[in-house]
Amino acid sequence: MSSRLKDVAALAGVSIRTVSNVVSGTGAVAEETRARVQAALDELGYRPNLAARNLRAGRTGLIGLVIPELHSPYFADLAGLIVAAAQQRSWTVVIDQTFGDDEAERRLLEGTGGRMVDGLIISPWSLRPGELTARARDIPVVLLGEQAARGLADRVAVDSVLAADEATTHLLETGRRRIAAIGVQPHLHNDTARQRLEGYHRALERVGLPRDAALELPVRALHREDGALAMTALLDSGARPDAVFAFTDELALGALHVAHERGLRVPEDLAIAGFDGIEDGRYAYPPLTTIVPDKRQIAERALQCLADRIYSPAAQVPPLDVVVPHHLDVRGSTRAVARPAHGE
């Protein structure tokens, strides 16, 4: 005979409600208690009847994940972490990509491709805030990234302004003074580029350096090719940067490739820093300095927000604006080097 919740509760010495919370991934359960319940679940081989449970609750057991690009290393990593964390809650994740197209984002946000899901996690690039948050009135929606939620939906993000400030400050501390920014995207409503540019400006202003439009390079997208094109344009312009802060690691890797092609030594002639902490950067030459968001925590906090809304729809909890940690991983591409004084 298959085990029941009350059998697990008796073995673990807890209430049936506590076992239910552990199985569903909801509610506040102490880590020691959760471990004890999980051990009892494993020992008894308890397997919840998900279909029956979801049917009784009017749920499907499916959640949607809408991201701009599956082939992006950053979003691929994040999607993998979300799927793994969702499996711990016995959820199945349906993934769609939008390529940053506003019509695709709108279609998936409004109907998730015709699929019925219990909640939606979306990383938008093109839609305006009002369009994004209107959908939160129908099903639970969690936004990922810098797009403002305006208090109408839960949002999980890193502090891009602070992180960009830290990356630029690091370059300044190595003695660089002509720092280019690659990644400006005025054509998007997504706030990612704007916030990273703001952090870059803050760091320059703190040390009294003026803004130089010639050192701020726009890009169409955030891929290696776009970084390479921007770096080529920068060097052809005669701007003579001594450092580059790229708004993604892919942009930074494209810039690094062009620097090598042009015979520039990195970091001696040109320091390069990125943002995202993708694995490729660790194996570049030299290894890429980067801002590393806590992607695992992004996944877990987004799913927790979704679970709270799905399982407690009547709870009058204001939408959360969750800021997850990040850190600057200093590697060889920005190593401090002896630089001649001005005028030598």
Image (spheres, rainbow, N blue to C red):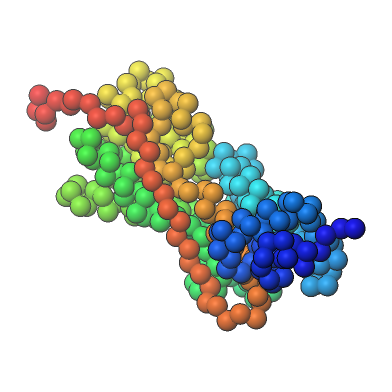
Query: Farthest residue toward the right?
Result: 1
Quarter-wise, where is residue 344 in the image?
Answer: top left
Above or below residue 341? Residue 46 is: below
Q: At 41% from the left edge and 49% from the top edge, which residue is drawn? A: 326
Q: What is the quadrant of the N terminus in the image?
A: bottom right
Residue at 38% across / 35% down in the picture? 289
Residue 276 visible somewhere in the drawing = yes
Say whether residue 227 is left or right of residue 4: left
Of 78 and 249, nearer the camera is 78
Residue with the most extreme left position: 343
Residue 101: percent from the left, percent from the top?
62, 53
> Is 125 on the left-hand or right-hand side of 274?
right
Q: Residue at x 24, y 48 (%)?
A: 204
Where residue 46 appears, x then y in whole percent? 79, 56
x and y, in percent, of residue 306 in the image: 63, 65
Q: How many marks?
A: 0
The image quadrant of residue 332 is top left
Q: In this view of the protein, can residue 127 be seen by the observer?
A: no
Q: Nearer the viewer, residue 143 or 295?
A: 295
The residue located at (67%, 55%) in the rendering is: 38
Which is nearer the eye, 79 or 236? 79
Position of residue 333 measured from the top left corner of the image (x, y, whole percent): 35, 29
